[in-house]
Amino acid sequence: MALAATLVVFIGMVGLTMATLAMSRIEVRDSRRSIDDVRAQYLAESGVERGLQLVAGAIERAGATAPLENVVNLFGGETQFRPFDAVSLMDDGAQVGAYSVTLTLLDQAADRITLRVEATGYLPDHPRNLGPNQTLDQWESVSTTVRYQLEPSEVFNYAYFINNWGWLYGNTIDVNGNVRSNGQFDAGGYKPTINGQPAYEAVNADGATVTLTGYQDSNGDGLLDGEDGGIWSGWDIANSANVRGIGGEARNQHEFDDQVEMPNLSDLSQYVDIATEEGSSITIGGVTMTNAVYGDEPGEKGDIFLYGTPADPIVLDGPVVIDGDVIIYGTVTGQGSIFASGNVYIPDSLEYANPPTSVRPADTTQAETEAWLTANWDKDFLGLYSAENIVVGDHTHKTWKKYVGGWMKSSLNSSVEDAGEDGIPNTKAGKDGILGTADDDVLEGDGIWTVETYSETDDELGLIPAGYSVGDPIPGSGEDIDGDGTYDTQTTLTDVTLTKSINSGQFGGNVPLGGVSKYSDIATLYAGRLDAVMYTNHSFCWTVFGGAPAQINGAVISRNENIVYGTPSVEMNYDCRLLGGVTGKAGKLLPQIVRPPQILMWRKLDTDPNRGEVAP
């Protein structure tokens, strides 16, 4: 009996051991399969990333020429294509698998496109590449739907934005809004006041009331109290201990933030399309100065002169494009913007006939901001955007030249397109400030204009805009800071000096009868009020004097800033109608960029869209 019992126990133990071994084999197999699932998933996601990189490259290669259309060009007139098929993915010289990618164009409009990216990862390789004794171990497919949309750049979230080193050197500078620089921000030990402005995700105007949504708690204190905003910098914030207002508080100073993209105005064709679709115009005294575009029809000079009075103001109706220089001053009314391919000259003050009830809300709380927007939603609004420079006051006066020219020559204010990988001068030593370390910007100041060029592959994919060829610089790439595809040296007074005669033979618009004999006849050093949102990716130049505070009621955004004031103070009052980006009142009147892709949907697939197989 004892022997029988022992035998039964032994048989049971053997059975348990065999079962355990079988289960172990199953677990190992399942574990291996699970690992293969993860690896195949990784390969598929790598394919999605490759597809998105292709689209991003198409947008970049468009420069300023209809970037979304360049994405559509990838499809060659179809709605679907497979840019990557059975592509091997390598790691340190060893193949880890393969992927295929299919792109589908789902939706297309003037300001947006929607794409589906479907990618499949294969282990150990794509089936067509497997040898006679190899089998496909695993595959995974994923699908993501993404949207690319044109929208105003975030530079318009700021009253003062500099795509360079920014500074507020003065004790009587009052910024009622936020400030930002893509390089270092320096207060120079002075006592400027920065009162800040909370940002919002969206604005909704239902006719009677304007509401804001998506309050941005930028200082992270958990409060939606209107005490957000302040100073942002792509580098450090220096010498700011004496800054007054909420911008002087450490919680409202944001250093080493990501750079914000400047819109590229070197090609205005996309704005021509918008202006034409809107049926825009500028009139004075009931006479049309220009329709949507000036300079595109026989007899139009390209350059335009616009002077408004309280009795006969410049009447704005939507965005217009001027193919040349603009001279504008006096009184304006309506809502619109001017995109100029040349310089914008403002010889004297520029004021709204029907301005907002106050330049700013009573305070920066959401309730007061909404009340201000409701009261002023339809008040006058002007945007002035130059592909070259914005020149305020009498640039022919020796005093103006002395101060502006002095700042132009400063090494702190460099505009040479040899600024390195980050596009910001004086950063060669990197953020650690020590030359010879890993973060050095070795391209800065090397005497070589480093840009990407169009390739044969770009040509085959239809990604080279009209007027460009294989080997030409890609506008906006590398050190091409202004995005025009041409190397620029240091900006000088010559670049901002108007050399054309101001008469009806040279300028359209309402040039005085007999013309203007010299610029100083219409210009002054006392151009102390600017009611406008102003943008240039070159220089903003302004020397101003007078007994009253100088005012910018809107915003000033530029690559280089040459503002010198001899007034009691200078005020920059951010126009809250810029809030909310594309949903704001000014959304359709602002320069645009392509926003980062918005992921609308992501999911795993049971079928392989690149082969028509069903998942096991």
Image (spheres, rainbow, N blue to C red):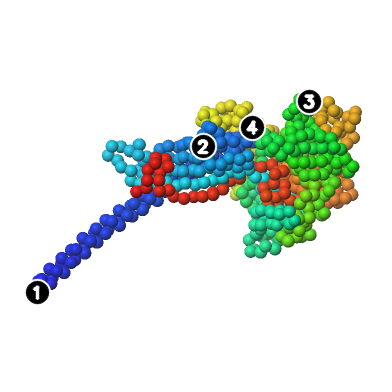
Report the amino acid beneath label 1: Met
Residue type indicated by callout 2: Thr
Q: Earlier in the sequence, mark 2 or mark 4?
A: 2
Residue 442: image location, x then y, percent: 58, 39
Q: In the image, which disc is placed on residue 568?
A: none
User: Which residue has dot 2 on it?
Assistant: 79
C-alpha distance separating marks 1 and 4? 98 Å
| Residue annotated with mark 3 | 299
Q: Is residue 38 visible?
A: yes
Gap in Å between the C-alphas at discs 2 and 1? 81 Å
User: Residue at the spot x=88%, y=36% of the render?
Assistant: 522
Contact flag, marks 1 and 4 (Cβ < 8 Å): no
Q: How many neighbours does mark 4 have within 10 angstroms: few (below 14), some (14-19), or many (20 or more)?
A: many
In front: mark 3 or mark 4? 3
- Please, which residue is most extreme toward the bottom here? 1
Say whether residue 43 is left or right of residue 196: left
Mark drawn on residue 1: 1
- Name the quarter where the N terminus is drawn: bottom left
Secondary structure beneath label 4: loop
User: Which residue is at a point 72% across and 49% down the rendered structure image?
Assistant: 585
Q: Position of residue 599 (x, y in %)?
A: 54, 49
Dot 3, crowdedness within 10 Å: few (<14), some or many (≥20)? few
Q: In the visual, does 133 lie left or right of 45? A: left
Residue at point 61%, 49% (across, down): 258
Q: Which residue is mark 4?
A: 485
Three-letter code, disc 4: Gly
Q: Earlier in the sequence, mark 3 or mark 2?
A: 2
Instruction: Report the number of discs.
Output: 4
Q: Farthest residue to the front: give it.
A: 207
Q: Looking at the rendering, which quadrant does residue 241 occupy? A: bottom right
